């Protein structure tokens, strides 16, 4: 059992926990939730033994093995499979003893260690490690590639695989879904359902928490409160507590009234009936969970569009992809999607499904006009105003400008007070509205990017992973705002709660095609698990057949030579397209490594109690400023890396 008894802990002069007590039983799976900065990661450091209580005590069984996801991955030359196997420390120790016995020619010790190897399931370990990697999105060929050949996001997946490989009693996962697509998230959920140990997970993905957890630990006001049940059940229990304070959620009645008005006006109108039904569902959810979010930092809503063309946009036999210099004076086309024919109607709310690299972002970029079609035609409705949000847009924000300056640039004729009132709805009020955005967090910059889009009153909203960097409270505000949006929505997200609450139809992007998906997200989950199992079986069969074929081939050497030459030419052209992106990714990763080193030194200084002596005031102030600057730069670089990596995957 894990037990915290009257536990208190401060970092510097900031108290994070004060006399809090809670317990977890063996085998329970707990979601750790709370506002950013409340101390969730600090609690993990306490469980790992890296930090110790200022008062009270923490106890857990001394024999327990603890697994967690490492934040750094060495650029090792060992294969991804061998790196994953390193997670089973007991197995590696047995292997080392076997090697020592072989060197010493000690037959008795060798027999003993081979028995220990069998007891450690050593003969099945490579297959288990391979299954972990395939489930997390690696191909069979990639499991044999060196760790150094993978980029940052894929190395984080390797770290996750290594943690899952560890035969642990306690598994600590901090935002495990951040670098995963929906396919890998579904697989991870299935794996965690079967995990026999105790699990504590930090996540902003409420559907992931609902699926995996049976206990919720809520960190608020320097205390941890235990709730039985998953995240949705926690919301209900907390809502029931807060509902006793009627005045606390009166601010949400205005939103409820707005939704109800739409339902009353359009419920009987055939062309709007489906949207009315969607808002009825949103209203039911809002009335149930609203009190749990009375402390939300802000709420916002979309402005009503000026026009509603129908159809909004038509694509006819469009080929979506990238065009680059082939290196021989001509261009080379890299098609991602073929034969896309769509007619986007006013009021549609479409969710795009599909694995990373299949072309969801490519389709959205083509719809937004930031990527020209390679073939086919596109026609926009008269009066179409597109609002496009993607992570790379955070790069276009000017770090030395304030939110007010950003908004004034696109609304030069609006009065300053009108702009300030609008920004206040996104929690940019007072001095924050006129302060440079350089030290803002990734979530705050994402909110500002959304605000700039919303000001322009779009009637077609294209959102590509809008919840990255957003905490649960901000995701809730976005979900409620999208439920009231009067225009057309196309959404890419691995946040299934947002997809369920904001869309009413799905399209599947897979195998270079875009097709309607007949089903809901539960059907898609079943489809993913079924096809993932089939794909893994097919990959193994193809791998085995290829090996047999190589052994038995004796004819057709000339044809194979010609085929290899053609394949080499294609690889060369692809390499030329990839090289600028790979160079950019390497530069970003090198800069992130430097900044992480700086951040570690700054964090250590801030955590030192001596830094808060009066004589250190000036240095502490400067260190805090540098700390905010470094954190902001790291978040910006992460967004740039994600964008470059996605382009690289699509080309490859």
Image (cartoon, rainbow, N blue to C red):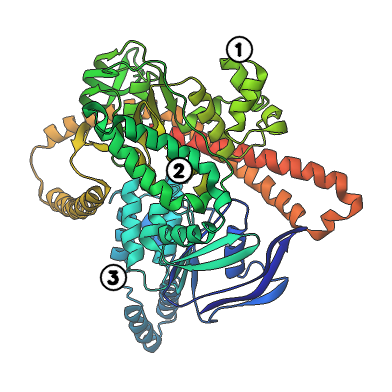
* Left or right of 465 on screen, residue 35: right
- Say above or below: 341 vs 93: above
Between the C-alphas of marks 1 and 2, the distance is: 42 Å
Residue sitting at x 54%, y 40%: 589
Q: Mark 3 highlights which residue?
A: 124
Q: Mark 2 highlights which residue?
A: 151
**Quadrant where the image shows the C terminus:** top left
Find residue 9 and report its image quarter: bottom right
> Dot 2: few (<14), some (14–19), or many (≥20) neighbours within 10 Å?
some
Residue 469 visible in the snapshot: no
Find residue 92 and report its image quarter: bottom left
* Left or right of 565 on screen, residue 15: right
Residue depth check, mark 3 versus mark 1: number of the one nearer the observer: 1
Residue 84 visible in the snapshot: yes
Q: Secondary structure at mark 3?
A: loop
- Say above or below: 288 vs 337: below
Residue sitting at x 16%, y 54%: 541
* Left or right of 328 on screen, residue 150: right
* Left or right of 258 on screen, residue 272: left
Q: Going by the picture, which residue comes out furthest to the left?
A: 555
Between the C-alphas of marks 3 and 1, the distance is: 66 Å
Q: Mark 1 highlights which residue?
A: 412
First in sequence: mark 3 vs mark 1:
3
């Amino acid at each position: 059992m894990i037990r915290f008894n009257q536990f208190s802990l401060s970092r510097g002069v900031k108290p994070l926990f004060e006399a809090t007590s809670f317990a977890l039983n063996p085998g329970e799976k707990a979601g750790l939730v709370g506002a950013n900065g409340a101390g969730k990661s600090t609690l993990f450091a306490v469980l790992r033994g890296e930090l110790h209580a200022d008062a009270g005590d923490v106890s857990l069984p001394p024999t327990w093995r603890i697994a967690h996801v490492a934040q750094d991955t060495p650029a090792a030359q060992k294969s991804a499979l061998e790196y994953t196997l390193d997670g089973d420390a007991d197995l590696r120790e047995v292997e080392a003893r076997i090697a020592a016995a072989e060197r010493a020619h000690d037959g008795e010790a060798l027999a003993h260690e081979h028995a220990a190897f069998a007891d450690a399931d050593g003969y099945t370990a490579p297959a288990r490690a391979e299954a972990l990697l395939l489930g997390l999105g690696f191909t069979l060929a990639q499991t044999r590639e060196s760790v150094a050949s993978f980029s940052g996001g894929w190395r984080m997946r390797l770290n996750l695989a290594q943690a899952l490989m560890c035969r642990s009693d306690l598994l600590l996962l901090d935002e495990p879904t951040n670098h995963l697509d929906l396919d890998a998230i579904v697989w991870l959920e299935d794996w965690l359902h079967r995990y026999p140990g105790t699990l504590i997970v930090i996540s902003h993905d409420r559907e992931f928490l609902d699926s995996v957890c049976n206990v919720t630990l809520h960190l608020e006001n320097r205390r941890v409160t235990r709730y039985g049940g998953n995240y949705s059940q926690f919301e209900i229990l907390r809502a029931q507590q807060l509902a006793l304070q009627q005045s606390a959620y009166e601010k949400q009645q205005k939103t409820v009234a707005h939704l109800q008005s739409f339902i009353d006006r359009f419920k009987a109108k055939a062309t709007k009936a489906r949207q009315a039904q969607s808002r009825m569902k949103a209203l039911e959810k809002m009335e149930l969970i609203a009190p749990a979010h009375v402390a939300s930092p802000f709420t916002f809503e979309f402005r009503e569009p000026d026009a509603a063309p129908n159809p909004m946009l038509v694509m006819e036999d469009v080929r979506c992809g990238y065009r680059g210099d082939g290196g021989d004076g001509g261009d080379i086309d890299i098609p991602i999607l073929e034969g896309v024919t769509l007619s986007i109607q006013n009021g549609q709310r479409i969710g795009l499904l599909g694995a990373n690299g299949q072309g969801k972002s490519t389709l959205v970029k083509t719809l937004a006009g930031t990527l020209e079609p390679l073939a086919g035609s596109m026609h926009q409705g008269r009066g179409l105003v597109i609002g496009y949000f993607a992570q790379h847009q955070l790069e276009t924000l000017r770090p030395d400008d304030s939110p007010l300056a950003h908004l004034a640039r696109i609304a030069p004729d609006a009065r300053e007070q009108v702009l300030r009132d609008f920004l206040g709805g996104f929690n940019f009020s007072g001095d924050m509205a006129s302060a440079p955005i350089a030290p803002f967090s990734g979530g705050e910059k994402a909110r500002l990017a959304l605000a700039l889009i919303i000001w322009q009153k779009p009637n077609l909203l294209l959102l590509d992973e809008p919840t990255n960097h957003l905490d649960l409270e901000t995701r809730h505000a976005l979900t409620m705002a999208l439920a009231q949006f009067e225009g057309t929505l196309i959404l890419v997200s691995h946040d299934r709660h947002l997809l369920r609450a904001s869309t009413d139809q799905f399209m599947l992007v897979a195998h270079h095609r875009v097709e309607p998906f007949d089903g809901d997200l539960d059907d898609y989950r079943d489809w993913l698990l079924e096809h993932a199992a089939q794909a893994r079986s097919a990959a193994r069969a193809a791998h085995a057949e290829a090996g047999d074929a190589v052994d038995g081939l004796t004819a057709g050497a000339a044809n194979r030579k010609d085929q290899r030459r053609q394949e080499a030419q294609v690889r060369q052209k692809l390499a030329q397209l990839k090289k600028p992106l790979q160079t950019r990714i390497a530069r970003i990763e090198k800069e992130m490594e430097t900044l992480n080193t700086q951040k570690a030194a700054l964090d250590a200084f801030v955590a030192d109690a001596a830094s808060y002596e009066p004589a250190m005031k000036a240095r502490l102030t400067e260190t805090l400023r540098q700390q905010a600057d470094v954190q902001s730069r790291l978040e910006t670089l992460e967004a740039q890396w994600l964008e470059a990596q996605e382009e690289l995957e699509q080309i490859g």
